[in-house]
Structures are given as structure tokens and as C-alpha cells.
Image: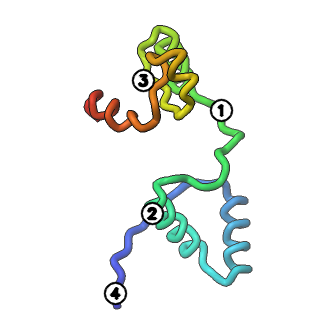
Amino acid sequence: MSMNTASITIKTDSQIKAQAQQVAKQLGVSLNAVLTDLLKQFIKTKAITGKAPTDEIPNAYFKKMVKKARADRLAGKASPIFTDDEKLIKNDPKKYQHVDTMTQWLHGQGV
């Protein structure tokens, strides 16, 4: 049985690569098998498991977008916060909407 394969080139720290290869070898699998399984899980779950890197420094674009998002939220130009907390919804129905209405709201936004 032939398998249709493609190559992926990634850049990573050489020590991380060496350590990952060592652990994979200890487990009796190739690093290729580990990464392929990781990609399959990513496709299946559409989520990244594990913790986010804590050593990354936000770039200027990211900082600008966070600042804009905060300003938009304060100006009331943001999507509602979807929740099932009836007290929050009752106190501020413009800011909070029931989580069951999220799909309807997104559809109204053209998403």
C-alpha cells in the first residue's frame, strides 16, 4: 500500500529537536510519527492541546490590535458577551446575551 506523503519544514531550537528525538526514540517511535499524530489530533479536535508559550513577546501589530479591541469594547462596538448567567443578561442585555443566541447573532453578522 503506497501512502501519499508531503514534507513539512519547520524551524525549532536545535536542543528542542534533539530532546524530542530522544524521547520519541525512548518510546520506540519516530519524531515523524509523533508530529503526524499531533497533526491528526489538531485536525480532529480543531484545538491546540497543552499550554501556550509563555516566553513569546507580543509584536507591535498584536499590541495594536489588543488596544483597538479594548477601545472598541469600551465604545460598545464589540460583539455581546455570550453567557448563561441570567443575572448578567437581565442587568445589561446589550452587553450580555444568552449563549443559545450566539449562532443567531453570528448569522446576523454574516458569519
The residue singled out by tag 1 in the image is 57
User: How far apart in space, not on screen, are marks 3 and 4 (Cα)?
Assistant: 49 Å
Element on which disc 2 rests: helix
The quarter of the displayed image where residue 52 is located: top right
Nearest to the observer: residue 110 or residue 47: 110
Disc number lying in front (2 or 4): 2
Q: Earlier in the sequence, mark 1 or mark 2?
A: 2
Badge 3 amino acid: Ser
Secondary element under disc 3, as helix, strand or loop, is loop
> In this figure, which residue is indicated by the disc labeled 2?
44
Residue 89 percent location from the top left of the image: 51, 23
The residue to which callout 4 is attached is 2
75 relative position to 101: left or right:
right
Instruction: Check whether the beta carbons of the residues at disc 2 and disc 4 lie within 8 A of each other.
Output: no
* 81, above or below 22, in the image: above
Marks 4 and 1, how far apart at CA: 43 Å
